Amino acid sequence: MLQDFFLQLRRQIPRGKRLNHGRRWAIAALVWVSGSGVASAQTWTNFTNSGNTWSTATNWSPGLPAFDATTVLTFDSTASNVGFYTAIADGATTYNVNQIVVDGIAATTLTNNNAAGTIRFAGTNPSIAINGAATLFIVNGTGTTDLTLTNSGLGIVGGGSGGVALTGTIGGSGNLTINRTAALPYYVGGG
Amino acid sequence: MTIAPSSGAGNNTFTGSVILNNGNLVLDQTNGAPLGSASNAFVINGGTVQGINAALTIANPITLGGTFSFVGSQNGTFTGTLGGAGNIRIGVTGLATFQNAISAVGGITVEGFGAPSALTLSSTATLNGTTVGSTSYSINNSTLTLDNTTANATRLNTGATMNLNAGSLVLTTNSAINGAERVAVLNLNGGNQISFNTNTTHSSRLTADVVNQTANGTFQIITNNLATLGGIPGTSNNNNVFFSNLSAANNINGVLPYGFAIQSTGSSNGTGGWCATTAPMALSP
């Protein structure tokens, strides 16, 4: 495929202005990466519980997620923002994500405040990963379906001590697989 | 991992399986069905399951690929079928009730984590709630009830081993037909009890082909006050326990030395000589 691309490119550039071999490979690599579905990873940055909507670009680093089948959303709270915080999926849209990763220590709440909105897990092996002490709550918002499964299903994974609580409506079609590797808390909620 | 539809959320509507490989799955049924459609398969390959805030009623068919551990403090009623290859471990500090056929191949253990557990195999209108595939039953400081109140059925696998470890086995009789259960081996460890919870017209019978005593294990047989302990089997409300292949050590001059029979006030002793009323237990003629 890359070879074909080079041939097309070469034919369209006057002979005297053609790129050398190294530059051709660099350009090709950029084109390849941008179109090949490499996961886009965004990290949540707003732990103030104010202006905390998903549609606000400054709430994400390095910028607004693409919300497609490769999107990885990381919620990484640190000691400076302990407690709890909420991130609001505010659009009248389907927020496609592939992974939600919770690395931090603060209770993390995701909610949907738009009746037409939903968080939809798509792509290859969609998952929620709990790697830290924080518990993730995906709570009932104003959306008809707060969390939507696809045929790819959803895996709940991670060895962190935090839990996952799904209290909103789960819809769609797909398997929900729990494969936590944390120690088993027998008599308490979460886990 | 908690699935707890809130009051505004209602039932989860997704279609697909819920697969538990590892972890503690906490289900809150207060406001809606956490496992989605009742036809969704619930596949358990490991981990633990528990209810929270309210008793659980799970209608989903359950398939075991590992041990199904039901724990916590909320009661659970399982009305769907239960199959596959795996063990069932009841560790709830309450009651677990299985109302449908259990065809899973594996053992059933009832044991409490800090407090005794109770497991009831019962049924609704049809002959179900059986455990034909189970290889063993271990009752550890807990209670297993075979409840034929609504419908009579043979609920134990006749080829299985029953391990009573300070355990209690209760047979509740149907009002229209006699009940009969059989196991291949009965192992006794600690102080154990076999109870007949019966009525004035029909009875239950428990047969164990082999009985083994471990560490001075004992057992007592007890009836409620409506029934007779001993007497002609299958007649009226005569409840019996049979040991079909006793060793010499278990049959000392016609007495089983570590078994006791107790009748509640108001009950009567059978006249057929199948059981005595007081310790030690006289064996059948």
Image (tube, grey):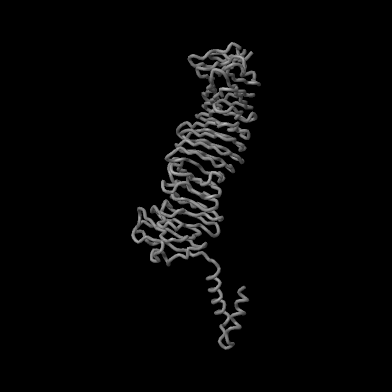
Looking at this view, name the residue that lies furthest to the bottom. A16
Which residue is pictured at 38% across the width and 66% down the height? A58
Give the x, y percent position of residue A56: 39, 64
Which residue is pictured at 36% across the width and 59% down the height? A47
Task: Using the image, determine if residue B117 lies above or below residue B264.
Answer: below
In the image, is B1 to the left or to the right of B129?
Answer: left
Q: Mark yes or no: residue B274 visible.
A: yes
Give the x, y percent position of residue A81: 35, 57
Q: Between A32 and B248, which is closer to the camera in this rendering?
A: A32
Say which quadrant the N terminus of chain A sits in. bottom right
Q: Mark yes or no: residue B146 visible.
A: no
Give the x, y percent position of residue B69: 52, 39
Task: Using the image, determine if residue B41 lies above or below residue B236.
Answer: below
In the image, is A84 to the left or to the right of B23?
Answer: left
Task: Using the image, determine if residue B186 lies above or below residue B133.
Answer: above
Q: Between B227 and A1, which is closer to the camera in this rendering?
A: B227
In the image, is B155 to the left or to the right of B8?
Answer: right
| Count of numbered circles in the view | 0
Give the x, y percent position of residue B97: 52, 34
